[in-house]
Amino acid sequence: MVIEVTCPKCGETFSVEVETPVKERKPRGQLAGIALEDMTDDQLKREIINAGSVLYKAKQRGAAEDIIAANQARLDAAKAEKAKRHPVVEAESPAEELAEADEEIASEI
C-alpha cells in the first residue's frame, strides 16, 4: 500500500510504501475445521446450534439458493452425526401405555 504524506512544517509531499500484514484466515463452518466424526458431544451440540443459526440468518437476508442449500446440508450432516451417535428409541405413545395398564388392571379384577 502506498501512502502520500505531506509535511506540516515545509509542505513537502512524499510517498511511503507500507506492507500490511495478511490476516490468517481461520476456517469457517465447522468448529476450527474439526471433522464431525472427531468432535466431542459438546462440540457437536455447538455445531448444530451454529449451523442452525447460519441457516436461519441466510434465509432471513434472502441469500442465494445455493448458499441456503449448503447451509442446510451442513445442518443435516451435523444432525445425522448426532443421530448416529445417539439413536432415538421409539417410545410407545402415552395412550398406548394407558390402554395396556387398563387391560392389566381389568385382568386382575
Image (spheres, helix red, strand yellow):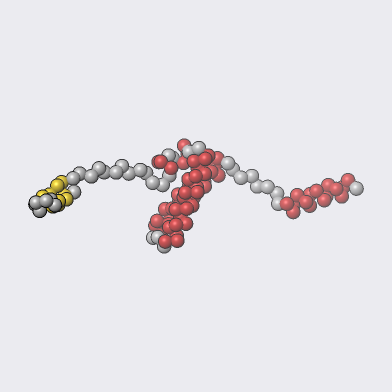
Give the residue furthest to the bottom. 62
Give the residue furthest to the right. 109
Q: Locate residue 107, reporting x and y percent.
A: 87, 47
The answer to whether residue 78 is visible is no
As drawn, is 89 to the left or to the right of 77?
right
Q: Residue at x 38, y 46 (%)?
A: 28
Q: Is residue 84 above or below residue 102?
A: above
Q: Residue at x 50, y 37 (%)?
A: 40
Q: Residue at x 55, y 40 (%)?
A: 85
Q: Locate residue 12, reporting x and y percent.
A: 9, 52
Q: Is residue 42 above or below residue 69?
A: above
| Residue 34: quarter of image | top left
Q: Nearer the viewer, residue 70 or 31?
A: 31
The answer to whether residue 95 is visible is yes
Q: Nearer the viewer, residue 105 or 11?
A: 11
Q: Residue at x 58, y 41 (%)?
A: 86
Q: Locate residue 13, reporting x and y percent.
A: 10, 52
How many marks can you see? 0
